[in-house]
Image: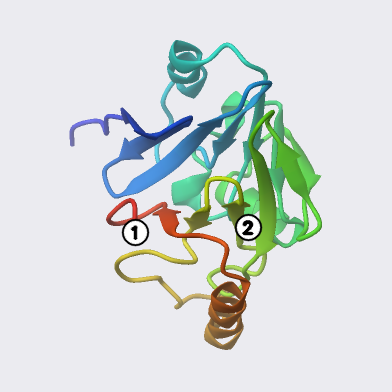
Amino acid sequence: MEPTTTTVKKISSGVWALEQEMVRCFLIVGQQRAMLLDTGAVPCDLPALIREITPLPLVVLNTHGDGDHTAGDHYFPDIHAHPDEFPIIRRFRPELSCTLHPITGLSSFDLGGRVLQVIETPGHTPGSICLLDHKNRILFSGDTLSYGPVFLSGDHRDIHTYRSSLVKLMALGGFDTIYPCHGTCPVS
């Protein structure tokens, strides 16, 4: 089997998609720091890829703990995630030695000229989150929304909670574009 390659593609001002076959993570660059949203499905030298784009300090956040979103977590000393995801991250990455920092729906990240608000969207996993960039009207949806299937079978999935998260996002609004981690990107 051939190794998976990671392709880097600028998709909008200050946003790059790092794609590995059917999964993508995002590098979001502000004026003062950058954020890596998820760390991919297979390990690759993410720090080197990021340094080619920006020298800014980096914050790393997992939208959820599934293994296709956390393969590169070991490259970073600190990972932010919802605390309900910590057991899932540890299940998929038992060797992980980084510090996990809790985030909630009250959390936001100011990258300098770009503020990303955490939106709790459980269902796909208990602590799934999305990030809302109000200024640019972009929702980074993780696995909560995509143009294609959202997997809801397995021990940590809950279809009723997922439906409530979709209703919450519809009521919230404030975005015109969705950047999902699977399928077509962007989705309007």
Residue drawn at (33%, 38%) of the image? 19
Q: Is residue 95 visible?
A: no
Q: Quickly name the residue at label 1.
A: 187
How packed mark 2 is, by other alpha carbons closer than 10 Å (few <14, some 14-19, many 20 or more), is some
Circle count: 2
Q: Amino acid at mark 2?
A: Ile
Measured as percent of width and height from the top left, residue 145 is found at: 44, 66
Does 16 sit above or below residue 127? above
Q: Quadrant of the C terminus?
A: bottom left
Front residue of 137 and 97: 137
Secondary structure state at the residue bearing disc 2: helix
Q: At x 53% / y 70%, what residue is drawn?
A: 124
Residue at 34%, 59% in the rendered image: 187
* Snapshot quadrant of residue 106: bottom right
Secondary structure, mark 1, is loop
- Label 1 Cα neighbours within 10 Å, binned few <14 / some 14-19 / many ≥20: some
Q: Which mark is residue 88?
A: 2
